[in-house]
Image (cartoon, rainbow, N blue to C red):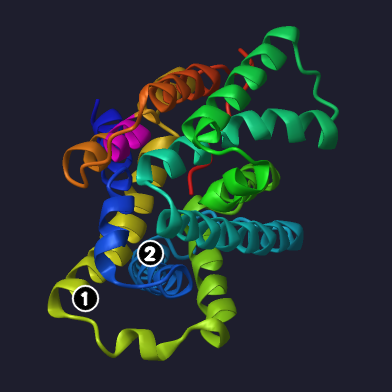
Amino acid sequence: MFAKLKFAISMAIFGSVGLFSEKTGLQSIELVFVRCLCASILLGTIWGGSTLKTQGIGKISIPRKEYLLALLCGLFLIINWVFFFRSLEVMPITVAVSIYHLAPVIVLLLGSVIFKEKITKMGLVFFFVCFLGTLLVGGIHQHTTMTGFLSTGVLWAFAAAFFYALTSIMGKGIQILSPLLTTVIQTTLGVLLLIPLVEWSNFVHLTFENWLYILVTGFIHTGFVFYLFFSSLRELKAQTIAILVFIDPIIAILLDVTILNYHPDVYQLLGIFLVFVGISYSPKDERILEKT
């Protein structure tokens, strides 16, 4: 029960990241840099403390391949975050989050190509349901040209979902390296990759309130959420996780509607419903459990 609660809390907190990101006053690159830095500090400290406690107890040899996979997943994770927060800059949270959660469906499609996993007829049906829902929630009915539709930020959100899916698929190859150390490696890589791209002048005129939201987004929405997520993940059944992950987009949409006063039209509401129906599908024998 405690594991369920921790996982549910992690999903609920992560669902508010869109709202908090808008209050930080930072662009996507700088915000992801701060997230990576804060998570590296918090999770690195937790990992270091746990390593000292267990030093010399059942030491396991970790293949070099797993470290390389962790770095590759880290690269995909950082790109995913940058694209996701970029989509939040140009489109409503409800729309961005709905499209972003296409990732499990993309995982199924990529899995069929990379791992030769067979997609059932039902899987294809749910894919097209998701695709239709994405077009509607993205507001395709509000535009007379495809160029106008694509300029709304849909491509940013879809790209974020694509790299989220790549992170999940590549992460399947990490079997021995602990999830906590894997995340520390990935967020540390993010700090190193983003330092040259950060526009430091964007931090100069931030208010106290901005910094409060920045620190919460970094330490709570990233570090603390990842700790809760990984410390509860292995104790839960796949079915339980498949249900609880819906807390994230539900919270995000509710906050967008109630606090930011976003009002989706009838077609977008239908699109949100179709996306949720589509992402509820998963093969009986497997469910990707990665979260970014």
Q: Is residue 180 left or right of residue 155?
A: left
- Say which residue label 2 marks: 43
- Say which residue label 1 marks: 211
SS for dot 1:
helix
Q: Quadrant of the N terminus?
A: top left
Residue for point 62% across, 22% down? 286
Q: What crowding class fits label 2: few (fewer than 14 Cα within 10 Å), some (14-19), or many (20 or more)?
A: many
Q: Nearer the viewer, residue 222 or 59?
A: 222
Query: What amino acid type is highlighted by mark number 2?
Result: Leu
In the image, which is nearer the foreground, mark 1 or mark 2? 1
Q: Nearer the viewer, residue 87 or 171?
A: 87
Residue for point 51% across, 41% down? 100
**Residue 164 in sight:** no
Residue for point 62% across, 16% down? 126
Q: Is residue 69 left or right of residue 54?
A: right
Considering every residue shown, the one lying at the far top of the view is 121
Query: What amino acid type is highlighted by mark number 1?
Result: Trp
Considering every residue shown, the one lying at the far front of the view is 144
> x, y (%) of residue 48?
40, 69
- In the image, is residue 222 part of the stretch drawn in magenta? no
The part of the chain drawn in magenta is 247-253
Residue for point 50% across, 67% down? 187
